[in-house]
Image (cartoon, rainbow, N blue to C red):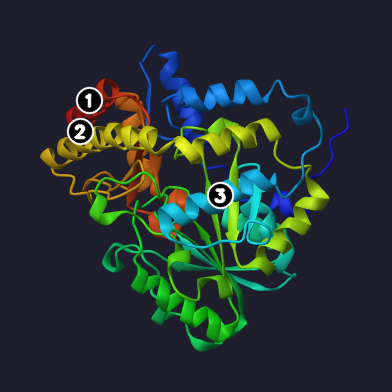
């Protein structure tokens, strides 16, 4: 059988983050070791029953069996606008400032195709979700990374970006609450970024999929659209995946500046046929009636967070207590080498899978990420094994 070379855009991709971990995991499992996976951020809890019931009713409607609109049903976009107004106080025109997505990853991956020309400079805050830089590369853009460090509360140092870079930059990708560091951003930070972006015509791309996973009402994460002037320069990507345990449903939205939303819509018009309308109807039910279910979810994650944090602190691993997301971003214990060396040793000796920080970008070296996406008993077992190591 003939073997054909991959296109340069694929051949230049970095090694898959979990490839080596998967190889070691298979070896350890072959020895009969009970594997506890705290690596991938995929909720283990089921989608709430009322959302499933809404889907069951919607899927029986013949009108939903046809091609949907790429931009989303008017009722879905109205529900998004209403949810943003109720949650963030942000006003959106559902006709021009909201577009449906087949999961936020799809929209993020397509967005640079609408605005980045070959050679354009794109700033990416890192450690980061790898889709930002991969999507930029697919569009022919040049990536420049802005490091997120503990010393700066895992926010980019905007003052460290020189004037020439701001003038050349086409867009900036950022993500708060942040994956993997679990950091959050406040209005003062967003206001500074918006002022810089307006002064230099930089597009602000904000991925905010984790706003509803938080642990203190006084520290609720915000939308960039809460800040005055944001709609002049920003598009925000959100998702129902983490909010309502709907990762497999692939349902999200992009909102904000009308020309940015329209540009993304133009790409989607040519590459996909829209989000299945029955899923949109289920999404409407989630946004209209899901607050209680999400509050219950936060209670569960808080118990899990506290279980892991208490155990790590007792053995001298001084990680931050996250205010949001279901991740714990922890420094590698002294004497255990690099992120990859620690994760490999942990897996081989205990059967516990965590994610090496450097897999999210160079500034992630020296850290590892724990996902709180298994039950409390399994988490207790995992931290017990880590403690013994």
Cβ–Cβ under 8 Å for marks 1 and 3: no
Mark 3 lies on a secondary structure that is: helix
Q: N-terminal of the two: label 1 or label 3?
A: 3
Residue that numbered label 2 is attached to? 307
Q: Nearer the viewer, mark 2 or mark 3?
A: 3
Crowding around mark 1 (Cα neighbors within 10 Å: few <14, some 14 to 19, many 20+) is some
In the drawing, what numbered circle is on residue 236?
Answer: none
Q: N-terminal of the two: label 1 or label 2?
A: 2
Q: Where's the N terminus, which quadrant?
A: top right
The answer to whether residue 276 is above or below residue 113 is above
In this orientation, does residue 388 appear? Answer: yes
Coordinates of residue 23 in the picture (x, y in percent) = 51, 28
Q: Where's the C terminus, which quadrant?
A: top left
Depth check, front residue: 218 or 313: 218
Q: N-terminal of the two: label 2 or label 3?
A: 3
Number of marks in the rendered image: 3
Cβ–Cβ under 8 Å for marks 1 and 2: yes
Coordinates of residue 106 in the picture (x, y in percent) = 65, 47
Depth check, front residue: 16 or 38: 38
Distance of label 1 from label 3 (alpha carbons): 38 Å
Crowding around mark 2 (Cα neighbors within 10 Å: few <14, some 14 to 19, many 20+) is some
Mark 1 lies on a secondary structure that is: helix
In the drawing, what numbered circle is on residue 80?
Answer: 3
Coordinates of residue 60 in the picture (x, y in percent) = 71, 20
The answer to whether residue 386 is above or below residue 126 is above
In the drawing, what numbered circle is on residue 380?
Answer: 1
In this orientation, does residue 139 appear? Answer: no
């Amino acid at each position: 059988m003939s073997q054909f070379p991959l296109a340069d855009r694929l051949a230049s991709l970095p090694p898959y983050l979990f490839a080596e971990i998967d190889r070691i995991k298979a070896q350890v499992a072959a020895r009969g070791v009970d594997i506890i996976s705290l690596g991938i951020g995929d909720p283990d809890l089921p989608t709430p029953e009322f959302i499933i019931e809404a889907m069951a009713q919607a899927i029986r409607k013949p009108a939903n069996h046809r091609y949907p609109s790429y931009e989303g049903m008017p009722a879905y976009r109205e529900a998004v606008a209403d949810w943003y107004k109720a949650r963030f106080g942000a006003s959106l025109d559902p006709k021009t400032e909201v577009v449906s997505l087949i999961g936020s990853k799809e929209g993020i991956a397509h967005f640079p195709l609408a605005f980045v020309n070959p050679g354009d400079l794109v700033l990416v805050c890192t450690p980061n979700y790898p889709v930002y830089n991969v999507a930029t590369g697919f569009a022919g853009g040049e990536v420049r990374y802005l490091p997120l460090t503990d010393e700066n509360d895992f926010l980019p140092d905007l003052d460290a970006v020189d004037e020439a870079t701001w003038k050349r930059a086409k867009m900036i990708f950022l993500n708060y609450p942040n994956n993997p560091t679990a950091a959050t951003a406040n209005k003062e930070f967003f206001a500074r970024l918006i002022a810089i972006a307006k002064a230099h015509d930089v597009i602000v791309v904000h991925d905010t999929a984790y706003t509803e996973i938080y642990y203190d009402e006084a520290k609720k994460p915000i939308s960039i659209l809460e800040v005055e002037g944001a709609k002049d320069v920003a598009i925000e990507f959100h998702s129902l995946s983490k909010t309502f345990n709907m990762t497999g449903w692939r349902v999200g939205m992009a909102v904000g500046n009308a020309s940015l939303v329209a540009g993304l819509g133009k790409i989607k018009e040519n590459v996909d046929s829209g989000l299945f309308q029955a899923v949109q109807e289920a999404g409407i039910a989630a946004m209209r009636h899901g607050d209680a279910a999400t509050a219950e979810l936060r209670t569960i994650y808080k118990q899990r967070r506290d279980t892991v944090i208490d155990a790590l602190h007792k053995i001298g691993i001084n990680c931050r207590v996250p205010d949001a997301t279901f991740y714990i971003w922890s420094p590698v214990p002294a004497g255990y080498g690099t992120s990859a060396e620690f994760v490999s040793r942990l897996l081989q000796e205990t059967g516990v899978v965590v994610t090496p920080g450097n897999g999210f970008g160079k500034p992630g070296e020296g850290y590892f990420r724990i996902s709180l996406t298994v039950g409390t008993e399994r988490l207790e077992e995992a931290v017990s094994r880590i403690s013994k190591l």
